[in-house]
Amino acid sequence: MKLSEENKHAILLEIHQIINDSIVFTIQKFDNKEKNSLDYFVLTDEEEQYISSLKNSKLLQNIIKKVLTRNLDDSFLRFLSIIDGTSEPKEEFGKKSDFILVDMPDDFDESYDFLHDEFFESYDLWEKINSLSKK
């Protein structure tokens, strides 16, 4: 069973929405409108003060929007290329066999380990592998 056109369309549009939401969050942070924590990337008081000093810089905000948009576009494109099988993850990250994205079957096993559940847990391993490859 392949991924339906409806699901493919929804995923691609959702990616664009995620990129947009990320940019809006970043610009709101520079405008001091976003008071939510950055979770594990908590800004220091000095960093918060610097952001506050830049809140009226529309030119800097436009630059950040463009850089962030390009960065997120490229990131999702790399990810989709791995899913499509047109590129591969780094060898250091382990063996990769071919896989595809498909629609969920009606008899789907609910005990499946979802990737989003393991995303934050995988950060420590990525950091270790990444630091070893820089040596």
Image (cartoon, grey):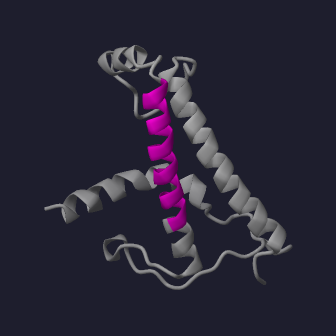
Which of 51 and 127 lies nearest the eye of the viewer? 51
Q: Name which residue lies at 54% across and 85% down.
A: 98
Q: Residue furthest left?
A: 135
Q: Which residues are magenta?
A: 58-77
92 relative position to 41: left or right:
left
Q: Name which residue lies at 48% across and 30% down.
A: 61
User: Which x, y percent locates residue 127?
Assistant: 31, 54
Q: Locate the N terminus by quadrant.
A: bottom right
Q: Name which residue lies at 48% across and 49% down.
A: 120
Whether residue 129 is visible, yes or no, is yes
Q: Main secondary structure of the magenta part?
A: helix
Splitting the image into 4 quarters, where does residue 109 fall? bottom right
Q: How many marks?
A: 0
Q: Name which residue lies at 55% across and 19% down.
A: 35
User: Which x, y percent locates residue 73?
Assistant: 53, 56
- Residue 69 magenta: yes
Above or below, 16 against 85 in this view is above
User: Which x, y percent locates residue 25?
Assistant: 57, 32
